Image (cartoon, grey):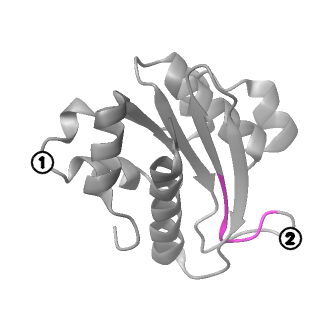
Amino acid sequence: MAGVDVPALLARARAAGLRITCAESCTGGMVAVALTDIAGSSDVFERGFVTYSNAAKVELLGVLPQTLADHGAVSEPVAREMAEGALAHSPADLAVSVTGIAGPSGSEFKPEGRVCFGLARRGRGTVVETVEFGALGRAKVRQAAAEHALQLLAGARD
C-alpha cells in the first residue's frame, strides 16, 4: 500500500516474534492481501477473517448480537469485539479490525466514509478509534481504510 512500508511492518513483527491476524468488513480482505503480497509473510501473517455480514461477525468472531443491536456494525464496540474475536479464534498475537461504510450510501447518523478500527494484542488493552474519511467514493474509502489498518499494525510496539 502506498503509505505503509509493509515489508518493514512484517520485519518488525517477525523480530518481535508476533503473529498477525485481521478481521475485515468494509475492506473485504484488502489488509490481508497487502500483508500476503510480500514473499515470506507466512511466518508473520496467521490468518484473516472477512466478516462482511453481521452473521459472519457473530459466527466467526464471536461479536455479540446485542452489541450489533445496540450500536450497529459500524461502531467502536463492534470493532473492539471483532479485533478481540480474531485473537480468540486464532493463535495470533496482534489483531486489527475494520468495519465501516465505504459507500455510496450512508445515513445522517453513519455517513459514508466512517470507519471504525480496533487493535488488539494478547495481554494488553484493545484500542479502538473512528476515522471519518468522508465521501471519497467506495474504492477510495476502502483503500484509505486498509492503509489506516496497516498503519495501526505498523505502530504497534513491543
For residue 121, side relative to residue 7 (left or right): right
Instruction: State which quadrant residue 77 falls in.
Output: top right
Label 2 or label 1, whichever comes before in sequence order: 1
Residue type at the position of mark 1: Ala
Q: Which quadrant would the N terminus be assigned to in this image?
A: bottom left
Q: Is residue 15 above or below residue 147?
A: above
The residue range painted magenta reads 110-116
Residue type at the position of mark 2: Glu
Asked if residue 112 lies in the magenta stretch, the reply is yes
Instruction: State which quadrant residue 106 falls in.
Output: bottom right
Tell me the residue that label 1 is attached to: 39
Looking at the picture, how far across and down is residue 35, in whole percent? Answer: 30, 49
Evaluate whether residue 148 shows in this view: yes
**What residue occupies the far left of the structure in this picture?**
39
Asked if residue 101 lies in the magenta stretch, the reply is no
Q: Nearer the viewer, residue 103 or 43?
A: 43
Tell me the residue that label 2 is attached to: 108
